[in-house]
Image: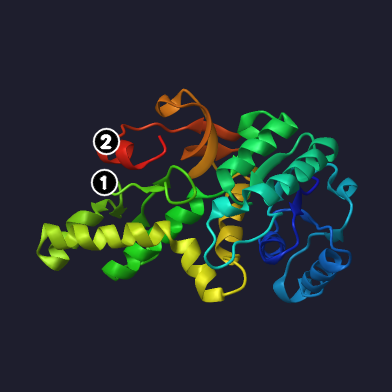
Amino acid sequence: MARAKISLIGGGQIGGVLAQLCALRELGDVVLFDIVEGMPQGKMLDIAEVARIDQFDVELKGTNSYADIAGSDIVIVTAGLPRKPGMSRDDLLGVNAKIMKQVSEGIKEFAPDSFVIIISNPLDAMVTLCQKVTGFPPERIIGQAGVLDSNRFCSFIAWELGVSVRDVNAMVLGGHGDTMVPIIRYANVNGIPVMEQLVRKYGSEAKAEEVMTAMVERTKMAGGEVVKLLGNGSAFYSPASSAITMAEAILRDQKRVLPCCALLTGEFGVNNYYVGVPCVMGAGGIEKIVEFELDDEICQTSSF
C-alpha cells in the first residue's frame, strides 16, 4: 500500500517542526514548500539525515515549486507572517490574505483532492478565504486553533491542580483570539468537575471563580504570552503538534472529537461562518459537528 503524501506550505519554524513530527510518526511521505530557495531543501535534508537514529522510513523533499505537492492527501498551511510583540492576530490580515490567496490557488491547481489544514493567522479569516478560493467542500478545509487553545487550557488546569495533564479534559471554542471561549462547565479531571476541585482546594466559591477566570484569561492570551517572551517570532511547536493531531485523525480514520474551525451551516444557530466547534474527524475530514446546549455565559461571551 502506498504511503500517504503530506505537503507543508511554509518552511518557517512551524513548517520545520511539522516535517519532523510527520517523519517521527511515519504519517507519510512529506513535501515542504517555501518560496525561499534552498531553505526547505536544507531543512528536509537535515531531518532526512537522522532517519536511522530516529528510526523512520519516509521520503522527505524540500521544494520551491507548487507542482511538487501534486497527489497530496493532506496539505497543512503555515505560510504567512508571524506576530510580533504588541500585535494581535487580526493585525496580520492584509498581508497574510494576499499570501493565502496565492497558496490556495496553488493547492487548487496541484492538489485538488487534498484535505487542507490551516494554521496561518488570523485563523478564521484565512480558512474562509482558502475555502472560497479553492471551492473545496467545507469538510476538507479545516482550521487548527481549538486543539491548541484547548490543550493550553488543559495545561493551565493541570498545573493549578497538580495533576497529570493526561487526565484533564477541556475545550475551547469560538474564534481564535480574544473571542475564544474556554468551556468551564465541561472542564473536568477524569470526569470530576474542575470547579468542584477548585472550591475544595481554596474553600471558597469566590476564590475558585477568581482562579478559573485567571486561567481563562491566560488561555485567551497564551499565544501573545509566547510572542512576548520570544521577542522575535511566535509559538511554533504547540501549533505544529496540534495540526499533526488533526492530520493523524484523518489519515488513520480515528474519529477523534477535536475542536476545529469548521464551516457551520445551521449548527448552533450559525450559518455560513467558520467557527471553532467540536468536530468528529476521520477519513472524511470533518465528518460531523457535535452540538451541545449553549448556556447564557457562552452566548454572551462568544462569537456564537
**How far from the left and from the top, in percent, is residue 69?**
83, 47
Determine the secondary structure under disc 1. loop
Residue depicted at 33% across the width and 47% down the height: 183
Q: Quadrant of residue 160?
A: bottom left
| Camera-nearest residue between 225 and 12 | 225
Residue depicted at 45% across the width and 27% down the height: 270
Query: Badge 2 is on which residue?
Result: 295
**How far from the left and from the top, in percent, is residue 123?**
58, 47
* The label number, if any, that marks residue 198 in the structure image: none
Q: Mark 1: which amino acid?
A: Arg
| Residue 72 relative to residue 87: left or right | right
Query: Badge 1 is on which residue?
Result: 185
Residue depicted at 30% across the width and 38% down the height: 300
| Residue 26 relative to residue 122: left or right | right
Report crowding for label 1: few under 14, some 14 to 19, many 20 or more residues within 10 A (C-alpha).
Answer: few
Q: How far apart, in angstroms, are the residues tagged by discs 2 and 1? A: 10 Å
Q: Which is nearer the N-term, disc 2 or disc 1?
A: 1
Q: Is residue 288 visible?
A: yes
Q: Mark 2: which amino acid?
A: Asp
Classify 42 as above or below 90: below
Contact flag, marks 2 and 1 (Cβ < 8 Å): yes
Classify 162 as above or below 169: below
Quadrant of the rendering where the N terminus is positioned: top right
Classify 227 as above or below 284: below
Q: Is residue 283 visible?
A: no
| Residue 294 relative to residue 256: left or right | left
